[in-house]
Image (tube, helix red, strand yellow):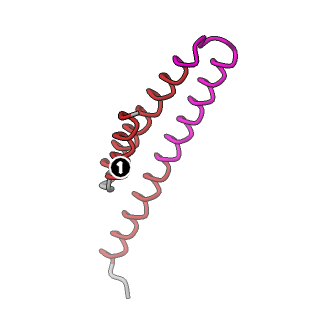
Amino acid sequence: MISEADRLDKAKKDAQKKAKEGDLKALDSSYGSDQAALKEMFLNGDIKREEDYHERMLELELDYLQSRKRLLIQYGEDTAKVEDQIVDKRII
C-alpha cells in the first residue's frame, strides 16, 4: 500500500516532469518558428548575404542552447550534453 507521503511525492514528480516537458516543447517550438522566420528573411532578400544568414542562424542556435541549458538547470537535469553542443558551436 502506498503511503500518503509517497503518493504526494509521486504526484509532485509527475507534475514537474510534465512542466519540464511542456517548457522544453515550447522552447523547441519557438526555436523552430525563429529558424523558419530567418530562412524566409533570407529567401525574401531581407538578409542579403549568405554569410549574414549563417551568422544569425548560429546566434539563434546558441541562444536556443543557452535557454535549454537554463531550463535543464531549473529542473535539476544534467546539462553536459547541451554544454558540449554549445562549445561545439562556438568552435565553428
The image shows residue 27, relative to residue 7, as above or below, that is above
**Who is closer to the viewer here, 79 or 8?**
79
Q: Quadrant of residue 43?
A: top right
Q: In which quarter of the image is the C terminus?
A: top left
Query: Predominant secondary structure in magenta?
Result: helix
34 lies left or right of 86 = right
Determine the residue positioned at 63% across, 18% down. 42
Image height of 17 relative to 74, above or below: below
Image quadrant occupied by the N terminus: bottom left
**Amino acid residing under circle 1:** Leu
Residue 31 to residue 77: above or below:
above
- At horizontal 53% and vertical 18% (from top left) the residue drawn is 51
Q: Which residue corresponds to the image point at 46% horizontal and 46% vertical from the top-left?
A: 23
Residue 78, image x, y percentages: 32, 56
Instruction: Specify the farthest residue to the bottom.
Output: 1
Please give the count of numbered marks on the rendered protein.
1
Residue 79 included in the magenta stretch of the image: no
Please provide percent x and percent y for residue 91.
36, 35
Q: Name the residue nearer the viewer: 84 or 79.
A: 84
Q: Name the residue under label 1.
A: 72
From the viewer's perspective, is 3 left or right of 60? left
Q: Where is residue 59 in the image (x, y as percent from the top left)?
A: 44, 26
Task: Determine whether, in the image, residue 60 is placed left or right of residue 78.
Answer: right
Q: Residue furthest front?
A: 92
Is residue 41 part of the magenta span, yes or no? yes
- 46 relative position to 74: left or right: right
Secondary structure beneath dot 1 equals: helix
Q: Which range is magenta? A: 24-52
Disc 1 residue crowd, few under 14, some 14–19, many 20+, Cα 10 Å: some
The residue sitting at 50% across, 49% down in the picture is 22
Task: Indicate the position of residue 48 as horizontal and vertical percent values.
Answer: 60, 11
